[in-house]
Amino acid sequence: MKDFDEIYRLYSKSIYRYLLYLTGDHHLSEDLLQETFYNAFKAIHKFEERSKVSTWLYTIARNTFLKYRNKNKKREILQFGDGMFEKIDLEMPDVIVERRDGMKAVISAIRRLEENYRQVILLRSIGELSFRDIGEMLEKNENWARITFYRAKLKLKKEMDDSAKSGGGK
């Protein structure tokens, strides 16, 4: 097993991006990232290397997020945080606004999907995990992950089309 510092260096950015898409909040994502790696460090002796390190870490991150969400049900955590759009190109503000609006529309549509669809879309797109790893992480099989991803893309397209027809949001 790799040194834990090396594991953090290799996976922290992608785990952070995954948490940022789940929460929409830069600061909360940083807190959950720290908690994820703290939990991983505490449980490193339990890692049996039957799965990839990345799959194990994404599972811990997902469980950390779900634990937080369940504790804070009254608080809406799926809102757009300023941290998601930190990079600004001052040369072309009209392009920035268009891109930002497009990104908000996609993220909003993803958040309207059922939990399984949302998880598979995020793990595949942001986490770049294989269908096999996603199935393992969500305690399903590879075919389930593949089919769920396909169905999620169809639902996402429908959400985007419906949103565009209704003028931008539900």
Image (cartoon, grey):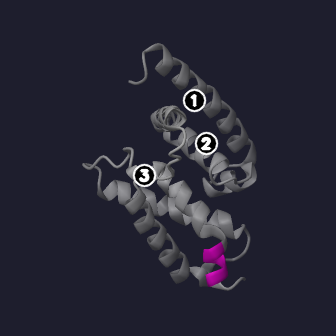
| Element marked by disc 3 | helix
Kindly give the residue lying farthest to the left in the view shown: 74
Q: Is residue 128 above or below residue 157?
A: below
Q: Is residue 110 above or below residue 84?
A: above
> What residue would you read off at disc 1?
156
- Residue type (three-letter) at the residue carrying disc 2: Ile
Q: Nearer the viewer, mark 3 or mark 2?
A: 3
> What residue would you read off at disc 3?
23
Q: Is residue 17 above or below residue 121?
A: below
Residue displayed at 56% across by 21% down: 158
Left or right of 106 in this view: 131: right
The Cα–Cα distance between marks 3 and 2, rounded to whole angstroms, is 15 Å
Q: Residues within 10 Å of mark 2 (few under 14, many from 20)?
A: many
Tell me which corner region of the image, top left, top right, bottom left or bottom right, holds residue 157. Answer: top right
Q: Is residue 108 above or below residue 13?
A: above
> What residue would you read off at disc 2?
121
Residue displayed at 69% across by 77% down: 48
- Quadrant of the rendering where the C terminus is positioned: top left
Q: Earlier in the sequence, mark 2 or mark 1?
A: 2
The magenta segment is 5-9
The Cα–Cα distance between marks 1 and 3, rounded to whole angstroms, is 18 Å
Q: Residues within 10 Å of mark 3 (few under 14, many from 20)?
A: many
Cβ atoms at labels 2 and 1 below 8 Å apart? yes
Instruction: Note whether residue 58 is visible.
Output: no
User: Residue 125 location, x and y as percent?
Assistant: 65, 46
- Residue type (three-letter) at the residue carrying disc 3: Thr
| Element marked by disc 2 | helix
